Amino acid sequence: MRTRRGASGWLFGLAVVATVGLLVLSLTVGVYDITGSEDGWRMFAITRVPRTISLVLAGAAMSMCGLLMQLLTQNRFVEPTTTGTTEWAGLGLMLVYLLSPGASIFVRMLGAIAMAFLGTFVFFLFLRRVALKSSLIVPIVGIMMGSVVGAVSSYIALRFDMLQQLGIWFAGSFTSVVRGRYELLWIVLIVTVVVFIVADRFTVAGLGKDIATNVGVDYDRVILLGVAMVSIATGVVTVVIGSLPFLGLVVPNIVSMIRGDNLRGNLPWVCLLGIAVVTLCDLIGRTIIQPFEVPVSLILGVFGAVFFVFLVLWQQRRA
């Protein structure tokens, strides 16, 4: 047992070194000449440092959200973009912009969080009321609900000439991240700490209401807390970055395949791998057609879709 823990510690240390290497590479990649320009280091502090910090916070938060939702629903295909949570957050963002065009980014964030909470709560309520025979039906229901909400957002955008803003919000990208515009992302760090503290209760709640109640856990309250944590993290990331599709699907499943299912044990690995994946995809997006950039959501979408198909085939083979 001690040997296994030692090997796991070494492996985690190597993963930390590799992820830090990617983050250092992220600081050095860009069109602007940092070392050759007179204001190069000022631009470095204004753009590249905030961008790299955002990669860390957003990657860890969305991966953690996927892990938490999969645990609470006992379904490996569930994450914020397959349950409609991201689309609800986008609708909230749009409604705030429509009702109060001059609202601050903090007020927009509150609107996104409120609608993300409502949408995620409706999704969980649906799962409790309807018994679904196949695990694949769950994400399909979530994607359908998200499509309906997305259609409502598109109608509002067309009706009030906001289609360009809608496209920008949903094309998840770190291009616009600069100093003074990303600091709200630090909220997701608090959410991650709370999830880690309450990890054992989430794990028990994931076993079902009967088991959770028998061991003295208030099942409904824990589920509500989980929905709130996912909604806050998704709302903040949607406002600052946009949609990061499939990140919460890919990362927790890779970790679970290797380490098994344990929220507290897997959480550091999920956060670390989430940071590495989103940083790698962002680097690809920044270099593939330089001097232009491809939104990281496109790279994640392609990678995530391939992994989704692999996961379906893998589960069928195990069954």
Image (tube, rainbow, N blue to C red):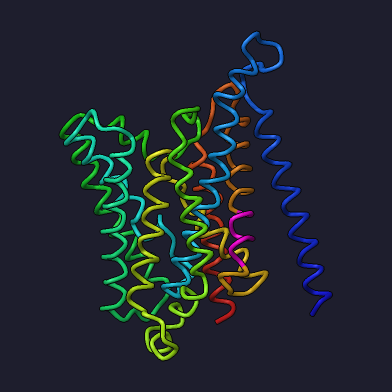
Which residue is pictured at 54% across the width and 48% down the height?
A: 59
Number of marks in the rendered image: 0
Q: Is residue 319 left or right of residue 212?
A: right
In this view, 316 is above or below 45 = below
Observer-nearest residue: 170 or 233? 233
Observer-nearest residue: 123 or 3? 3
Observer-nearest residue: 227 or 191? 191
Q: Where residue 96 sits in the image (x, y, percent)?
A: 22, 39
Q: Where residue 253 sits in the image (x, y, percent)?
A: 57, 65
Q: Residue furthest right?
A: 3
Instruction: Please tell me in which quadrant of the rendered image residue 217 appears.
Output: bottom left
Magenta stretch, residue numbers: 266-273
Q: Where residue 156 sits in the image (x, y, percent)?
A: 18, 39
Of the 4 image quadrants, the one containing the C terminus is: bottom right
Instruction: Please tell me in which quadrant of the rendered image residue 11 appears.
Output: bottom right
Of the 4 image quadrants, the one containing the N terminus is: bottom right
Q: Where residue 249 sits in the image (x, y, percent)?
A: 50, 60
Q: Residue furthest top?
A: 38
Task: Characterize the magenta stretch by its predominant secondary structure.
Answer: helix
Tell me if residue 109 is in the magenta stretch.
no
In this view, 198 is above or below 134 = above
Q: Is residue 56 left or right of residue 230?
A: right
Tell me if residue 267 is in the magenta stretch.
yes
